[in-house]
Image: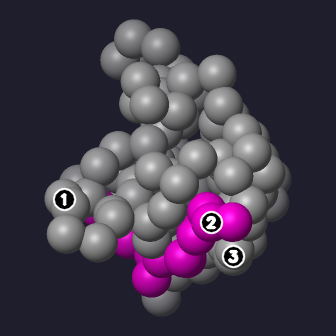
Amino acid sequence: QVQLVESGGGLVQPGGSLRLSCVASGFTFSRFAISWYRQAPGKERELVAIIRSAGDSVGSSINYADSVKGRFTISRDNAKNTVTLQMNSLKSDDTAIYYCNALGMQGGIPRNYWGQGTQVTVSS
């Protein structure tokens, strides 16, 4: 059974930090590109950061949305099937539900998996 379980969300003041984690199971984690998306109330879901697999030939292994560059850092630990999003200097605009996404091939078939999301609220 495929699972992506996010954790680490919560309420933080502007300028503060949070660390989100996504733990995966049920597929070959190391072969998948893992992304964090977010969706704020009334807005479309947007890509925040992506970290590709070691064998991915598409450009840079890590990309960020312009709005989070220099503040957020994505990393992965394939041994623990975990991706982390370190979020610093948080702003009210970062308030959203954050989702973990896994994209890749499993059993010769393209797969696109989503977690349930974790709420991040930036407010004083």
Q: Is residue 120 magenta?
A: yes
Q: CA distance from mark 1 to mark 3?
A: 21 Å
Look at the numbered discs 2 and 3 and tell me whether their residues touch, using CB distance below 8 Å. Answer: no
Q: Which residue is mark 3?
A: 10
Dominant SS type (magenta): strand
Look at the numbered discs 1 and 3 and tell me whether their residues touch, using CB distance below 8 Å. Answer: no
Q: Amino acid at mark 2?
A: Ser
Q: Residue at x 48, y 88 (%)?
A: 1
Camera-near label (2 vs 3) is 2
Q: Which residue is mark 1?
A: 44
Q: Residue at x 34, y 65 (%)?
A: 40
Q: Amino acid at mark 3?
A: Gly
Judge by depth and name the residue closer to the eye, 54 or 48. 48
Judge by depth and name the residue closer to the eye, 104 or 34. 34
In the rendered structure, the answer to whether residue 83 lies left or right of residue 33 reads right
Q: CA distance from mark 1 to mark 2?
A: 21 Å
Residue 23 percent coordinates (x, y)? 67, 69
**Image quadrant where residue 56 sits:** top left
Q: Residue at x 48, y 76 (%)?
A: 117
